[in-house]
Image: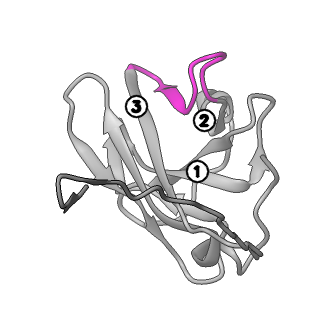
Amino acid sequence: MRPIQRGTLESEIESVVVTFIDSGKTEILETKKNSVCHFFSRFKVGSDCVQLRLDWSDINKNGYPVLDADFYDIKSGNKNSLTGTRRNSHHTNSAEGGGRVYSWTFEHYTSAFSVQITWLAAGICNASSSAIGSAIVSKVDGSYF
């Protein structure tokens, strides 16, 4: 798979749905204007508010988007620096040989999920067809069959 360019995400992908492996619950991911990411709902882990996103401009060795994590201060809403365990949890690749399956870990929290994508078809198709046929009509006892 090739990286997706900024400004073209909406013309290439119709929707992205994640299914959380532990609960079976699903979430439709959102986009933001002029972004190359699909965003999860934010959630709290310890003293951080976490924003996970699939980054379509950064394709991993398995051919899938890298899962990025951004960390925000719960009280101020300001982005926290990527130090310590935050740095280790910032980039997550899809599971080796597992398709679009990810397991994200930060501190004591782990979330595993699969990703389903509905792609928009694009391109040009030139097609033509012709057919030649024949039929044999037989008359038996005054009836055609």
**Mark 1 residue element:** strand
Estimate the x, y position of residue 48 in percent, counting from the top left: 42, 45
Q: Is residue 29 left or right of residue 145?
A: right
Q: Quadrant of the C terminus?
A: bottom left
* Inter-mark Cα distance, 1 to 2: 17 Å
Q: Earlier in the sequence, mark 1 or mark 2?
A: 1
Q: Earlier in the sequence, mark 1 or mark 3?
A: 1
What amino acid is found at the position of numbered circle 2 in the picture? Answer: Arg
**Mark 2 residue element:** helix
Estimate the x, y position of residue 117 in percent, counting from the top left: 49, 51
Q: Is residue 76 left or right of residue 19?
A: right
* Inter-mark Cα distance, 1 to 3: 12 Å
User: Considering only vertical position in the picture, is 87 above or below 75?
Assistant: above
Residue 45 seen in the current view: no
Residue bearing mark 1: 54
Q: Which of these two is toward me, 120 or 59?
A: 120
User: Considering only vertical position in the picture, is 73 above or below 95?
Assistant: below
Q: Which of these two is toward me, 69 or 55?
A: 55
Given this view, does label 3 or label 2 mark the residue nearer the observer?
A: 3
Residue located 32% across and 48% down the image: 43
Please give the range of residues in magenta.
94-108
What amino acid is found at the position of numbered circle 3 in the picture? Answer: Phe
Q: Earlier in the sequence, mark 3 or mark 2?
A: 2
Estimate the x, y position of residue 125 in percent, counting from the top left: 74, 73
Q: Which of these two is toward me, 55 or 8?
A: 8
Residue 114 seen in the current view: yes
Quarter of the image where one finds residue 124? bottom right
Given this view, does label 1 or label 2 mark the residue nearer the observer?
A: 1
**Which numbered marker is on residue 86?**
2
